[in-house]
Amino acid sequence: MESGVMPPLPLGEVKAQVKRMSGLDFFPKEPEAIRSLVDVLATRCAHLEHVKAVVGDCLERLTQAPKPAELLEVIERTKPVTIRAALSECPHCGGIGWVSTRRVVTVAGVGTYSADFAARCVCRGLP
């Protein structure tokens, strides 16, 4: 993985995971609604194992198919466990989820100087 670039999740496998939820009550029939669930999982999950954990959580806890907003809540709830387990050996952050960056800052009346900033690591799958 290049620094700062997340590899895309395989959409076919994400769609297969969404299909696992088709037995839940009120699972959407419209392709656009199903695509919304796929898009949320594909863009917000850190990796395929996280997608599987989210869908598994939905199947264990829900009787009705989640809407995208509800899916986001499940993604956030499952993120810490799946990320720690799968990404503890990240070469960029060592599994802590944060990297240090140095930037040149210019402040009026103070001048220009270098400062350290914390940034989320790309392994966390955040935009």
Image (spheres, rainbow, N blue to C red):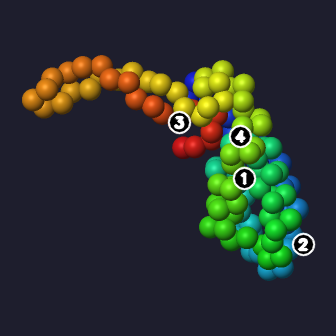
Picture quarter with the C terminus: top right
Q: Residue at x 9, y 29 (%)?
A: 109
Q: Amino acid at mark 3?
A: Arg
Query: Where residue 66 sits in the image (x, y, percent)?
Result: 73, 70
Query: Where residue 119 sits in the image (x, y, percent)?
Result: 48, 33
Q: Earlier in the sequence, mark 2 or mark 3?
A: 2
What separation in Å lies between label 1 and label 4 (alpha carbons)? Answer: 9 Å
Q: Residue at x 72, y 25 (%)?
A: 89
The numbered disc on residue 3 is: none
Residue at mark 3: 120
What separation in Å lies between label 4 and label 2 (alpha carbons)? Answer: 27 Å
Vertical position of residue 103 compared to residue 127: above or below: above
Report crowding for label 4: few under 14, some 14 to 19, many 20 or more residues within 10 A (C-alpha): many
The numbered disc on residue 78 is: 1
What separation in Å lies between label 3 and label 1 (alpha carbons)? Answer: 18 Å
- Classify mark 1: helix, strand or loop: helix
Residue at mark 4: 83
> Is residue 110 found left or right of 30 in the rendered image?
left
What separation in Å lies between label 3 and label 4 (alpha carbons)? Answer: 13 Å
